Amino acid sequence: MKYSSKLRLQILFPVVLLTSLLLVFIVLAKRQQTQVENLFVISQVQSSLASVELDYENLRRNIFERVNHAGHSEKQQQLANEGKSKTQEIQQLIQGISEHLAFTKTDTSILSQDMRLYTAEFLRVSQLFDTDQAKTAKFERFESLFYTSNKSVKALKNELNAYTNNTVLPALKTIKTIQRNVGVLGMALILVCTFFLMKAIKNITQILGDEPSMIFKLLEKIKHFDFSITPSGSQGSVRWSLGEVVEDLSSFMAAIYDTANEQTRRTGMLRRNFDSTVAGMDEIKKIQTYFPPQCSS
């Protein structure tokens, strides 16, 4: 019971420690992966915002080029198609940005609204070039919406930079610090576990009383009826108990042999007595044959 409790503690304790350490590393790795993925998403959004900036600048340039190419129907049609394509691209980018930034809880409604108004104004102004109204039209509202959209994009970029610097990067730094501390603690725990496992091995050796390979060799000897084993090792160990069992077994076998020999001796005596009795009976029969009994008158 004493050895059983010790072994249970010395084996389970390192297993629990190492399992807990492994779970901590797994949790930290998942958190780190999440923050790295968030950082990657933010970089993609920053790239999308750069594309939006380029596209709404192209829409503004598109209007100026249409003014410069007034009267050129073929060029006007080309610029009109390019403008429509850019408006659709901006709408898709804004929708993707809103979806990607859901985890940051960043409000993208202002940017979406400004871009919607800006692209709608671009399409309205673009239609003026199909008539003569473009010659007398003024583009103050279009310019105003352009600068408003520009401010919205820059505001969102600044907000993302602030989120990255204040949330994602500190989280990654904290995780790395915890990982480093857990690594140091893990090394200490490994040493502690090694100590407990060495104690467990020592106790197992004490319980066995010899090396496991030697115990198996002794069992093979007993299996082949080789009883030349004497108690050795620490008293109460498996090695000592095997020696005692073999001695008891040898004594028991010797007692059986002695009993068998005694029974054989007694059987021989009975056989000889029986033979003597039979021989005596034969002699009596012979005497009776030569000297028959006489009848009295």
Image (cartoon, rainbow, N blue to C red):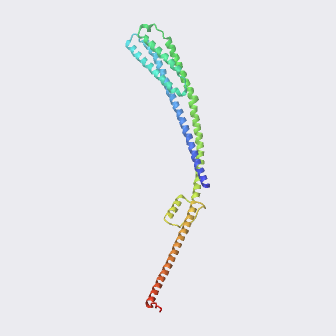
Name the residue: 47% across, 15% down. Answer: 120
Q: Residue 29: image x %, image y %?
A: 54, 37
**For this rendering, which residue is in front, 296 or 169?**
296
Q: In which quarter of the image is the N terminus?
A: bottom right
Q: Is residue 271 left or right of residue 180?
A: left
**Which residue of the protein is positioned furthest toward the front in this rendering?**
297
Quadrant of residue 187 within the rendered picture: top right
Q: Residue 104: image x %, image y %?
A: 54, 27
Q: Is residue 249 visible?
A: yes
Q: Residue 26: image x %, image y %?
A: 54, 39
**For this rendering, which residue is in front, 112 or 254?**
254
**For this rendering, which residue is in front, 295 or 87?**
295
Please tell me whether residue 109 is drawn above or below residue 283 in the rendered image. above
Q: Residue 73: image x %, image y %?
A: 38, 12
Please tell me whether residue 159 is drawn above or below residue 20 in the rendered image. above
**Which residue of the protein is positioned furthest toward the right in this rendering?**
2
Please tell me whether residue 50 is drawn above or below residue 2 in the rendered image. above
Name the residue: 50% across, 81% down. Answer: 273
